[in-house]
Image (cartoon, grey):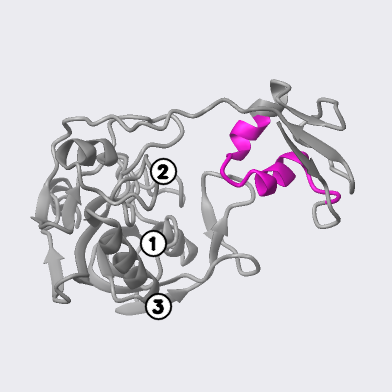
Protein backbone atom coordinates (compact mmCIF):
# COMPACT_ATOMS: atom_id res chain seq x y z
CA UNK A 1 0.00 0.00 0.00
CA UNK A 2 1.13 3.56 -0.77
CA UNK A 3 0.19 6.59 1.30
CA UNK A 4 0.14 10.19 0.07
CA UNK A 5 -0.60 13.36 2.01
CA UNK A 6 -2.10 16.16 -0.07
CA UNK A 7 0.02 19.31 0.02
CA UNK A 8 -0.94 22.87 -0.78
CA UNK A 9 -0.13 22.55 -4.49
CA UNK A 10 -2.84 19.90 -5.00
CA UNK A 11 -5.45 21.32 -2.61
CA UNK A 12 -8.88 21.95 -4.18
CA UNK A 13 -8.04 19.68 -7.14
CA UNK A 14 -10.30 16.90 -8.39
CA UNK A 15 -9.28 13.56 -6.90
CA UNK A 16 -8.70 11.89 -10.26
CA UNK A 17 -6.51 14.77 -11.44
CA UNK A 18 -4.54 14.79 -8.18
CA UNK A 19 -4.00 11.05 -8.50
CA UNK A 20 -2.80 11.42 -12.09
CA UNK A 21 -0.07 13.68 -10.70
CA UNK A 22 0.79 11.28 -7.88
CA UNK A 23 0.55 8.14 -10.04
CA UNK A 24 2.07 9.45 -13.25
CA UNK A 25 2.17 6.04 -14.94
CA UNK A 26 -1.55 5.32 -14.44
CA UNK A 27 -4.20 6.73 -16.79
CA UNK A 28 -7.17 8.74 -15.50
CA UNK A 29 -9.49 6.03 -16.87
CA UNK A 30 -7.77 3.36 -14.78
CA UNK A 31 -7.71 5.68 -11.76
CA UNK A 32 -11.49 6.06 -11.97
CA UNK A 33 -11.97 2.29 -12.15
CA UNK A 34 -9.67 1.82 -9.15
CA UNK A 35 -11.70 4.41 -7.22
CA UNK A 36 -14.93 2.62 -8.17
CA UNK A 37 -13.43 -0.69 -7.01
CA UNK A 38 -12.39 0.77 -3.66
CA UNK A 39 -8.68 0.28 -4.30
CA UNK A 40 -7.99 3.96 -3.55
CA UNK A 41 -9.30 5.59 -0.37
CA UNK A 42 -9.26 9.15 0.95
CA UNK A 43 -9.08 9.39 4.74
CA UNK A 44 -10.05 5.70 4.77
CA UNK A 45 -13.25 6.39 2.81
CA UNK A 46 -14.25 5.77 -0.81
CA UNK A 47 -14.62 8.98 -2.79
CA UNK A 48 -15.74 9.79 -6.33
CA UNK A 49 -13.31 10.98 -8.98
CA UNK A 50 -14.87 14.45 -8.75
CA UNK A 51 -14.11 14.82 -5.01
CA UNK A 52 -12.01 17.94 -4.35
CA UNK A 53 -9.04 17.01 -2.22
CA UNK A 54 -8.04 19.19 0.72
CA UNK A 55 -4.65 19.94 2.18
CA UNK A 56 -3.51 17.16 4.54
CA UNK A 57 -5.99 14.63 3.14
CA UNK A 58 -4.52 11.14 3.36
CA UNK A 59 -4.77 9.08 0.17
CA UNK A 60 -4.23 5.32 0.49
CA UNK A 61 -3.48 3.37 -2.68
CA UNK A 62 -3.78 -0.40 -2.30
CA UNK A 63 -1.74 -2.75 -4.48
CA UNK A 64 -3.06 -2.13 -7.99
CA UNK A 65 -3.59 -4.93 -10.52
CA UNK A 66 -0.45 -5.62 -12.50
CA UNK A 67 -0.65 -4.86 -16.19
CA UNK A 68 0.40 -7.44 -18.74
CA UNK A 69 3.91 -6.46 -19.82
CA UNK A 70 4.76 -9.05 -22.46
CA UNK A 71 4.32 -7.95 -26.06
CA UNK A 72 3.43 -10.88 -28.28
CA UNK A 73 5.34 -11.40 -31.51
CA UNK A 74 2.95 -11.58 -34.48
CA UNK A 75 3.67 -12.38 -38.10
CA UNK A 76 2.39 -9.09 -39.49
CA UNK A 77 3.74 -8.24 -42.98
CA UNK A 78 6.08 -5.25 -42.90
CA UNK A 79 6.95 -3.03 -45.85
CA UNK A 80 10.63 -2.50 -45.02
CA UNK A 81 12.09 0.29 -47.17
CA UNK A 82 15.56 0.10 -45.59
CA UNK A 83 17.27 -1.97 -42.90
CA UNK A 84 20.72 -2.29 -41.36
CA UNK A 85 22.13 -3.34 -37.98
CA UNK A 86 20.96 -0.13 -36.30
CA UNK A 87 17.61 0.84 -37.75
CA UNK A 88 14.75 0.20 -40.14
CA UNK A 89 12.59 2.50 -42.23
CA UNK A 90 9.05 1.15 -42.47
CA UNK A 91 6.27 2.18 -44.83
CA UNK A 92 3.27 1.79 -42.51
CA UNK A 93 -0.07 1.05 -44.20
CA UNK A 94 -3.27 2.89 -43.38
CA UNK A 95 -5.26 1.17 -40.63
CA UNK A 96 -2.26 -0.24 -38.73
CA UNK A 97 -1.83 1.01 -35.14
CA UNK A 98 1.82 1.70 -34.28
CA UNK A 99 1.89 0.29 -30.74
CA UNK A 100 -0.51 -1.30 -28.22
CA UNK A 101 -2.72 0.94 -26.14
CA UNK A 102 -6.12 0.91 -24.49
CA UNK A 103 -8.31 -1.58 -26.32
CA UNK A 104 -5.63 -2.96 -28.65
CA UNK A 105 -2.96 -5.26 -27.23
CA UNK A 106 -2.23 -7.02 -30.51
CA UNK A 107 -2.21 -6.53 -34.26
CA UNK A 108 0.05 -3.47 -34.10
CA UNK A 109 3.25 -2.51 -35.85
CA UNK A 110 5.12 -3.16 -32.59
CA UNK A 111 3.85 -6.76 -32.56
CA UNK A 112 5.09 -7.19 -36.11
CA UNK A 113 8.46 -5.64 -35.31
CA UNK A 114 8.99 -8.05 -32.42
CA UNK A 115 8.33 -11.00 -34.76
CA UNK A 116 10.74 -9.60 -37.35
CA UNK A 117 13.64 -8.77 -35.04
CA UNK A 118 14.94 -9.71 -31.60
CA UNK A 119 17.04 -6.54 -31.56
CA UNK A 120 14.95 -3.46 -30.86
CA UNK A 121 15.53 -0.47 -28.60
CA UNK A 122 14.04 -0.64 -25.11
CA UNK A 123 13.87 3.06 -24.22
CA UNK A 124 10.11 3.40 -24.73
CA UNK A 125 9.25 0.27 -22.75
CA UNK A 126 8.03 -3.25 -23.42
CA UNK A 127 5.04 -2.24 -25.53
CA UNK A 128 6.92 0.20 -27.79
CA UNK A 129 10.13 -1.62 -28.78
CA UNK A 130 12.05 0.34 -31.37
CA UNK A 131 9.37 3.02 -31.69
CA UNK A 132 11.03 6.44 -32.01
CA UNK A 133 8.03 8.36 -33.38
CA UNK A 134 4.56 7.36 -34.47
CA UNK A 135 1.89 7.85 -37.09
CA UNK A 136 -1.85 7.84 -36.43
CA UNK A 137 -3.73 4.64 -37.27
CA UNK A 138 -5.19 6.00 -40.52
CA UNK A 139 -2.09 7.96 -41.53
CA UNK A 140 0.09 5.84 -43.79
CA UNK A 141 3.73 6.40 -44.59
CA UNK A 142 7.36 6.32 -43.54
CA UNK A 143 8.71 6.05 -40.02
CA UNK A 144 12.08 5.06 -38.60
CA UNK A 145 12.57 2.26 -36.06
CA UNK A 146 15.62 1.92 -33.78
CA UNK A 147 17.25 -1.47 -33.23
CA UNK A 148 19.29 -0.41 -30.19
CA UNK A 149 19.21 2.24 -27.49
CA UNK A 150 22.20 4.14 -28.90
CA UNK A 151 20.39 4.65 -32.20
CA UNK A 152 17.14 5.50 -30.45
CA UNK A 153 18.73 8.27 -28.36
CA UNK A 154 20.47 9.80 -31.38
CA UNK A 155 17.29 9.76 -33.47
CA UNK A 156 15.33 11.33 -30.60
CA UNK A 157 17.92 14.10 -30.45
CA UNK A 158 17.34 14.73 -34.15
CA UNK A 159 13.59 14.97 -33.53
CA UNK A 160 14.26 17.60 -30.87
CA UNK A 161 16.71 19.68 -32.93
CA UNK A 162 14.65 19.23 -36.14
CA UNK A 163 17.41 17.55 -38.16
CA UNK A 164 15.03 14.63 -38.67
CA UNK A 165 12.78 15.95 -41.43
CA UNK A 166 9.32 14.66 -42.38
CA UNK A 167 7.04 15.64 -45.26
CA UNK A 168 3.40 14.65 -45.80
CA UNK A 169 0.86 14.75 -48.60
CA UNK A 170 -2.54 15.95 -47.38
CA UNK A 171 -5.79 16.55 -49.22
CA UNK A 172 -7.68 19.27 -47.38
CA UNK A 173 -11.16 20.69 -47.64
CA UNK A 174 -11.60 23.98 -49.50
CA UNK A 175 -9.40 25.87 -51.93
CA UNK A 176 -6.31 27.48 -50.36
CA UNK A 177 -5.55 30.74 -52.14
CA UNK A 178 -1.96 31.09 -50.87
CA UNK A 179 0.76 29.06 -52.59
CA UNK A 180 2.43 28.32 -49.27
CA UNK A 181 2.10 29.15 -45.60
CA UNK A 182 3.32 28.58 -42.10
CA UNK A 183 1.12 27.70 -39.12
CA UNK A 184 2.62 28.53 -35.72
CA UNK A 185 0.09 27.68 -33.03
CA UNK A 186 0.63 25.74 -29.75
CA UNK A 187 -1.25 22.46 -29.32
CA UNK A 188 -2.69 20.87 -26.19
CA UNK A 189 -5.38 18.39 -25.16
CA UNK A 190 -8.92 19.48 -26.10
CA UNK A 191 -10.73 20.38 -22.89
CA UNK A 192 -14.12 19.19 -24.18
CA UNK A 193 -12.96 15.93 -25.80
CA UNK A 194 -9.94 14.08 -24.40
CA UNK A 195 -9.57 12.11 -27.65
CA UNK A 196 -8.83 15.30 -29.54
CA UNK A 197 -6.05 17.85 -29.54
CA UNK A 198 -6.63 21.55 -30.10
CA UNK A 199 -4.81 24.83 -30.54
CA UNK A 200 -4.30 26.11 -26.99
CA UNK A 201 -2.73 29.55 -26.97
CA UNK A 202 -2.34 29.59 -23.18
CA UNK A 203 -1.22 26.09 -22.17
CA UNK A 204 -0.33 24.33 -25.42
CA UNK A 205 3.11 23.15 -26.49
CA UNK A 206 4.88 24.95 -29.32
CA UNK A 207 3.89 23.56 -32.72
CA UNK A 208 4.87 24.62 -36.22
CA UNK A 209 3.75 23.30 -39.60
CA UNK A 210 4.54 24.69 -43.05
CA UNK A 211 2.61 23.82 -46.19
CA UNK A 212 2.95 24.19 -49.96
CA UNK A 213 0.07 23.91 -52.42
CA UNK A 214 0.64 21.16 -54.99
CA UNK A 215 -2.73 21.19 -56.79
CA UNK A 216 -6.09 22.89 -56.43
CA UNK A 217 -9.44 21.23 -57.14
CA UNK A 218 -12.97 22.66 -57.16
CA UNK A 219 -13.48 22.21 -53.41
CA UNK A 220 -10.20 20.79 -52.09
CA UNK A 221 -6.46 21.33 -52.18
CA UNK A 222 -3.55 18.91 -52.29
CA UNK A 223 -0.73 20.22 -50.10
CA UNK A 224 2.66 19.07 -48.91
CA UNK A 225 3.12 19.66 -45.19
CA UNK A 226 6.47 19.81 -43.39
CA UNK A 227 6.66 19.26 -39.65
CA UNK A 228 9.05 21.35 -37.62
CA UNK A 229 7.64 19.93 -34.37
CA UNK A 230 5.89 16.61 -33.81
CA UNK A 231 2.81 17.12 -31.66
CA UNK A 232 0.00 14.57 -31.58
CA UNK A 233 -2.33 15.05 -34.59
CA UNK A 234 -0.33 18.18 -35.48
CA UNK A 235 -1.14 18.45 -39.20
CA UNK A 236 -4.76 17.49 -38.62
CA UNK A 237 -5.16 20.10 -35.86
CA UNK A 238 -3.29 22.88 -37.68
CA UNK A 239 -5.07 22.46 -41.02
CA UNK A 240 -8.43 22.39 -39.25
CA UNK A 241 -7.40 25.51 -37.31
CA UNK A 242 -6.96 27.50 -40.54
CA UNK A 243 -10.29 26.23 -41.88
CA UNK A 244 -8.98 23.47 -44.15
CA UNK A 245 -9.38 20.12 -42.33
CA UNK A 246 -7.87 16.98 -43.82
CA UNK A 247 -10.50 15.24 -45.92
CA UNK A 248 -11.73 11.99 -44.40
CA UNK A 249 -10.66 12.93 -40.86
CA UNK A 250 -13.21 11.56 -38.40
CA UNK A 251 -12.09 13.78 -35.51
CA UNK A 252 -11.46 17.22 -36.95
CA UNK A 253 -13.47 19.52 -39.18
CA UNK A 254 -17.00 19.50 -40.55
CA UNK A 255 -18.03 18.26 -43.98
CA UNK A 256 -14.77 16.52 -44.76
CA UNK A 257 -16.07 12.95 -44.33
CA UNK A 258 -18.95 13.59 -46.73
CA UNK A 259 -16.32 13.60 -49.49
CA UNK A 260 -14.25 10.62 -48.29
CA UNK A 261 -15.13 8.39 -45.35
CA UNK A 262 -12.28 5.87 -45.15
CA UNK A 263 -9.79 7.65 -42.90
CA UNK A 264 -7.87 10.90 -43.35
CA UNK A 265 -6.10 11.44 -46.66
CA UNK A 266 -2.71 12.08 -45.09
CA UNK A 267 0.48 10.29 -46.13
CA UNK A 268 4.02 10.62 -44.71
CA UNK A 269 5.89 10.32 -47.99
CA UNK A 270 9.37 11.60 -47.05
CA UNK A 271 11.82 11.21 -44.18
CA UNK A 272 15.41 12.40 -43.83
CA UNK A 273 17.88 11.95 -40.96
CA UNK A 274 21.55 11.49 -40.13
CA UNK A 275 22.48 7.87 -39.57
CA UNK A 276 23.57 7.73 -35.89
CA UNK A 277 26.56 5.48 -36.53
CA UNK A 278 27.78 6.24 -40.06
CA UNK A 279 26.92 9.98 -39.80
CA UNK A 280 25.68 9.86 -43.39
CA UNK A 281 22.50 11.68 -44.40
CA UNK A 282 19.78 9.25 -45.43
CA UNK A 283 16.56 10.24 -47.13
CA UNK A 284 13.63 8.19 -48.36
CA UNK A 285 10.71 9.22 -50.56
CA UNK A 286 7.78 6.88 -51.12
CA UNK A 287 5.17 7.26 -53.87
CA UNK A 288 1.61 8.14 -52.93
CA UNK A 289 -0.43 4.99 -52.16
CA UNK A 290 -2.92 3.82 -54.76
CA UNK A 291 -6.04 4.59 -52.67
CA UNK A 292 -4.89 8.21 -52.38
CA UNK A 293 -4.01 8.54 -56.09
CA UNK A 294 -7.25 6.87 -57.17
CA UNK A 295 -9.31 9.31 -55.15
CA UNK A 296 -7.45 12.31 -56.60
CA UNK A 297 -8.38 11.09 -60.08
CA UNK A 298 -12.08 11.47 -59.20
CA UNK A 299 -11.68 15.17 -58.38
CA UNK A 300 -12.16 18.07 -60.77
Q: Closer to the camera, 242 or 255?
A: 242
Q: Quadrant of the C terminus?
A: bottom left
Instruction: State how far apart marks 1 and 2 are (Cα).
Output: 14 Å
**Residue count near mark 2 (Cα–Cα under 10 Å), binned few <14, some 14–19, many ≥20:** some
Question: From what the image shows, is residue 206 above or below residue 59?
Answer: below
Cβ–Cβ under 8 Å for marks 3 and 2:
no
**Residue count near mark 3 (Cα–Cα under 10 Å), binned few <14, some 14–19, many ≥20:** few
Q: Which residue is mark 2?
A: 250
Q: Position of residue 76 (x, y in %)?
A: 17, 34
Q: Which residue is mark 1?
A: 235
128 sits to left or right of 279: right
Question: From what the image shows, is residue 54 above or below residue 39?
Answer: below
**Magenta stretch in the rendered image:** 11-32
Q: Closer to the camera, 192 or 248?
A: 192
Q: Quadrant of the N terminus?
A: top right
Residue drawn at the location 36% of the way across and 31% of the way down: 70
Instruction: State how far apart marks 1 and 3 are (Cα).
Output: 11 Å
Q: Position of residue 184 (x, y in %)?
A: 47, 75
Question: From what the image shows, is residue 255 above or below residue 87?
Answer: above
Question: Is residue 145 highlighted in magenta?
Answer: no
Q: Which residue is mark 3?
A: 182
Residue drawn at the location 32% of the way across and 51% of the way down: 135
Q: Secondary structure at mark 3?
A: strand
Amino acid sequence: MQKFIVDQTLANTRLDKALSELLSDVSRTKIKSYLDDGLILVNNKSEKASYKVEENDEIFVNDLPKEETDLSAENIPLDIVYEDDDLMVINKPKGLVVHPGAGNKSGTLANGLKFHSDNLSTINGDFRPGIVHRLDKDTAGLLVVAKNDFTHVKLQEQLVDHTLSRKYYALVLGVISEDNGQIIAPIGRDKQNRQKMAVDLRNGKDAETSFKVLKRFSNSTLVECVLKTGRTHQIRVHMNYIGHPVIGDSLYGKGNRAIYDDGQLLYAHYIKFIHPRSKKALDFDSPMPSYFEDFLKTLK
